Image (spheres, rainbow, N blue to C red):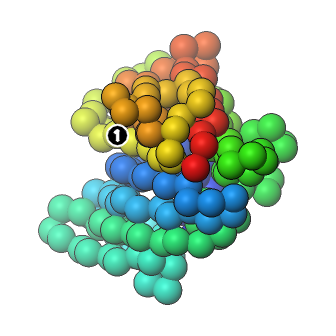
Amino acid sequence: MRAFLTILPAALALAACVEVDMTVEVLGEDEARVTGFMQMQRQMFEMSGGDTSFCEEEEGGTLTLTETHARCDFDMTGPYAEVLPADDDAPAEMAGALTYLGENRTRALLPLSAMDAGLEEMDDDPMMLAMMQQMFAGMSISFTVKGREIESTTGTMSEDGSAATITLGIDDLLVPAAERMDDFDTILRF
């Protein structure tokens, strides 16, 4: 699972192959709990050589293979850098992850603009874009951050003000660069 979390921004670029529902609950100045699932079509899993590194048991993952899907359910609690590692190859402002701001405040960043690298070729090939949209229609990525109180967010805030969510469908991801969504950026109190 850590392999997936480490490359979350890159994974978003390949989101047409993966469905994700992830919740990050900030528990303290350097502790968070990540729960949820990610799944891909069984055919895509087999095409990847059946690589199970995205769902390591010692990192809170439980892999389930069905006839149609490879699914990893995960539940992991630990320091920020372990449960939601930053992308070390990205510029600092695009790395993503959790950052303690002081005074019981944390910033959660999911840099959606970082997915441009994986989608550039589709901007120049409308036929490929249309094929990808049709092939992976209905798949989505949902990312939620929770705490005691959301201070600000670019996502959708829950009615009680304790969570912020962004849900991306394939149509949100497979669009020309100028139409892509802004980063999911949330500041919360725990």
Residue 21 appears in the rendering: yes
**Residue 11, horizontal then vertical, whole percent:** 54, 50
Q: Residues within 10 Å of mark 1 (few under 14, many from 20)?
A: many
Q: Is residue 131 above or below residue 45?
A: above
Instruction: Give the residue type at disc 1.
Output: Ser
Asked which quadrant contains residue 49, the reply is bottom left
Secondary structure category for the residue under label 1: strand
Q: Which residue is mark 1?
A: 140
Q: Image quarter for residue 159?
A: top left
- Residue in the foreground of this view, choosing between 42 and 89: 89
- Relative to 66, 158 lies left or right: right
Identity of the residue drawn at 49% across and 27% down: 155
Count of all numbered marks drawn on residues in the image:
1
Residue 128 appearing in the image: no
**93 in relation to 183, above or below:** below
Tell which residue pokes out farthest to the front in this image: 103
